[in-house]
Amino acid sequence: MTYIRNQAWYIPDKLIFAAAGGEGQPELLVAFLNDLNAMVESSPLPFVHIILDYQYLTKSLTLAQIAKVSSQFKPHERAGWAILINEPTSLLRMFTGVALQWMRVRQRSLPTLEAAEQFLATVDELDWSQADPQAVTRVLHDVKSRLDALHSVTHEG
């Protein structure tokens, strides 16, 4: 199994929706975080928030692996809030919180996309009329379908 990820603008230049699934791997997580930094860099706005959905994650990193990722990755200076949703275990929630604190990222773990949207509405003036709910659907569908395809290939014979 591998680490599958995807991301898209949920609100153009202001809010990224990202999802990851499969088994966490430090090198691939660093690559994913760098992809998110590139999206932040492409925005002309002063802060860009990220909602990260972990509902398809089957195995998280160890604390030692998280420390390694934290030492190899520097968040973009214009990164706003990182909101983690649908974390499958409390251990993942704890490890992720520790990692983001080490990296000095403002973060919250919330149960759902709706809770993340409500929280962000209290900390920033987001233009929700610009939101693209299909971006969420596309990202989640892509991650799940690639995981399903990998799963079917590894279990075929």
Image: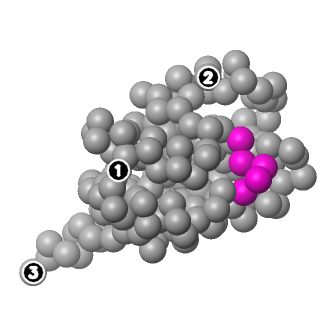
The reply to whether residue 79 is in sight is yes
The amino acid on which the numbered mark 2 sits, given as a three-letter code, is Phe
Residue at image location 14% in from the left, 72% down from the top: 155
**45 or 147: nearer the viewer:** 45
Mark 1 neighbour density, 10 Å: few (under 14) some (14–19) many (20 or more): many
On the image, the x and y values in percent for residue 69 come to 47, 65
Residue 32 shows in the view: no
Quick check: 125 above or below 100? above
Relative to 98, residue 58 above or below: below
Residue toward you, 81 or 130: 81
Task: Report the mark closest to the observer, 1 or 2.
Answer: 2
Report the label total. 3
Left/right placement of residue 153 relative to residue 44 reads left
Q: Secondary structure at mark 3?
A: loop
Q: Tell me the number on the disc at residue 119.
A: 2
Q: Position of residue 108 (x, y in %)?
A: 53, 32
> Would you call the spot at circle 2 few (<14 residues within 10 Å), some (14-19), or many (20 or more)?
some
Q: Quadrant of residue 21?
A: bottom left
- Give the distance between the C-alpha atoms of the residues marked 2 and 3, in whole angstroms: 47 Å
Front-lying residue, 130 or 31: 31
Amino acid at pointer 3:
Gly
Spatial CA distance of label 1 from label 3 is 24 Å
Asked if marks 2 and 3 touch (Cβ < 8 Å), the reply is: no
Which residue, given by chain and number where applicable, does mark 3 sit on? 157
Q: Quadrant of residue 157?
A: bottom left
Residue occupied by mark 1: 56
Residues in magenta, as a range: 76-80
Report the colour scheme: one colour
Q: Are marks 1 and 2 in contact (CB under 8 Å)?
A: no
Q: Which residue lies at the image location 49% right of the left edge and 39% below the top edge?
A: 84
